Each structure stands twice: as structure tokens, then as C-alpha cells.
Image (tube, grey):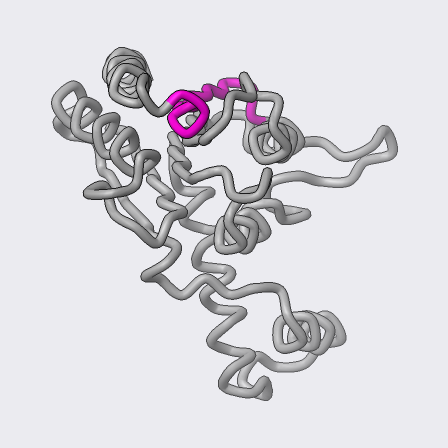
């Protein structure tokens, strides 16, 4: 039995969001194929996803200098605890699916905040004399992204996510781009159907 972590980085649901529609299609097909796997979905827009801010940085500094966790402010405790929880959820997962739109050639800010919780020295990578070494190489990752234009995986958001996961050691990395709906609105239906097909096919082997 595997653990699948699904990260949804869009404030809209599958009723209107193209990326969420493809993600939902993948998850449903995955469930049919893997009945006993545990699936944990996190919507970054309805969950508490702490950013690295003054509270977290000052808390890390205090803890690094030997302070007791109980001496932190309540905001610091809440943010650090949730940050660590998100890191652990990623570490516990065997497979990860991330779904997001391309916004202004970048990922949504909530997704960047989540990425910060999984790119953690000592947990998902380590520093060595030869340079940083990834520690998450046992995971399988799928990135689903909807784009109004056509970028063929070369947009900054797709490249950023691929770089991050390669950095922490992930080599079993997959990408489904559902793109060109705004550039070719007359073909939007066909583009979406191709995305659904790709998601269903990958779900059989993921």
C-alpha cells in the first residue's frame, strides 16, 4: 500500500479550474487502479500554509540557540508546528501530485510557500563536501499545470518545480501540461480531452 499526497494549488475547484479538473481525473483513475492506497489531498487555499516570515525566521533562530519551544510566541509555535507537519507529510508520502495554474509565468504564491516546506536541509537534502545531495530520491512526483499559452514545459513555473524536485533527489518525475486554451479557444475542448486522457493513462502506472 502506497501513500499518495495530492497538492492542489488553486482557489477554484474542479467545477471551473482546468488544472483541478485534470487533477481530479487523475485521482479518480488512480483510485480505481489502486484501491488500497492512502490518498491525502491538501488544498493550499483552504489549509494553513505558513510562509517563511519574521515569526518563523526568529523562531528558528531562537531554537537554534537552544531556546525551549514553549518560550516561543503562540504565532511562532503555530507556524513552526504546521511547517514541520507539512514537511513530514511530504516525507511520509511515496508519491506526490501537484496541480496548479500558470499565473504570470510563475506558480501561485501558496504553492511557493508549500515548496519551502519540502525543500529543507537535513530532511530532503543535505550538504556535503562535494555539494548538496538530495534525500528524496525514493519518491515519484507528477506535476499537472494548465497554461493559457503554449510553452511545452519551458515556462518558468514548470522549470522551477522540476529543478526543485531534481535538487532534492527526485528522478521519477512526470509532467502533464494542459495548454493553449486561451491561445486557441476553439480547440479548448480538444485540449482538455487530451489532458484527461493523459491523466488517465499515467494513473495506470504511477
Task: Let me know if residue 155 appears in the view.
Answer: yes
Does 183 appear in magenta? Answer: yes
Using the image as rendered, state which of residue 157 and residue 137 is in the foreground.
Answer: 157
Residue farthest toward the right in the current orientation of the protein? 129
Name the image quarter holding the C terminus.
top left
Which residue is drawn at the image coordinates 23% and 34% (left, top)?
24
Name the image quarter holding the N terminus.
top left
Using the image as rendered, state which of residue 182 and residue 203 is in the foreground.
Answer: 182
Which residue is drawn at the image coordinates 87% and 34% (left, top)?
129
Using the image as rendered, state which of residue 85 and residue 161 is in the foreground.
Answer: 161
Q: Give the magenta part as a residue range.
A: 170-184
Picture coordinates of residue 87, whole percent (x, y): 49, 51
Which residue is drawn at the image coordinates 57% and 43% (left, top)?
104
147 is higher (above) or lower (below) than 193: below
Picture coordinates of residue 136, whole percent (x, y): 55, 32
Picture coordinates of residue 6, whole percent (x, y): 33, 40
Using the image as rendered, state which of residue 99 and residue 101 is in the foreground.
Answer: 101
Whether residue 133 sits left or right of residue 37 in the image: it is right
Residue farthest toward the front in the current orientation of the protein? 186
Whether residue 184 sits left or right of residue 134 in the image: it is left
Which residue is drawn at the image coordinates 28% and 29% (left, top)?
22
Task: Let me know if residue 177 appears in the view.
Answer: no
Amino acid at each position: 500500500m502506497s501513500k499518495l499526497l495530492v497538492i492542489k494549488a488553486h482557489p477554484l475547484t474542479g467545477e471551473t479550474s482546468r488544472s483541478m479538473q485534470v487533477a481530479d481525473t487523475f485521482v479518480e483513475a488512480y483510485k480505481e487502479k489502486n484501491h488500497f492506497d492512502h490518498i491525502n489531498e491538501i488544498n493550499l487555499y483552504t489549509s494553513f500554509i505558513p510562509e517563511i516570515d519574521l515569526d518563523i525566521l526568529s523562531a528558528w533562530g531562537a531554537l537554534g540557540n537552544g531556546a525551549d519551544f514553549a518560550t516561543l510566541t503562540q504565532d511562532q509555535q503555530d507556524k513552526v508546528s504546521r511547517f514541520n507537519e507539512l514537511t513530514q507529510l511530504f516525507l511520509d508520502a511515496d508519491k506526490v501530485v501537484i496541480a496548479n495554474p500558470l499565473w504570470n509565468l510563475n506558480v501561485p504564491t501558496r504553492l511557493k510557500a508549500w515548496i519551502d516546506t519540502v525543500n529543507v536541509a537535513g530532511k530532503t537534502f543535505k550538504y556535503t563536501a562535494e555539494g548538496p545531495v538530495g534525500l528524496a530520491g525514493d519518491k515519484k512526483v507528477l506535476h499537472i499545470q494548465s497554461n493559457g499559452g503554449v510553452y511545452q514545459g519551458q515556462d518558468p513555473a514548470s522549470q522551477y518545480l522540476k529543478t526543485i524536485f531534481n535538487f532534492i533527489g527526485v528522478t521519477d518525475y512526470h509532467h502533464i501540461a494542459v495548454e493553449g486554451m486561451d491561445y486557441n479557444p476553439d480547440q479548448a475542448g480538444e485540449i482538455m480531452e487530451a489532458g484527461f486522457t493523459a491523466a488517465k493513462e499515467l494513473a495506470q502506472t504511477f
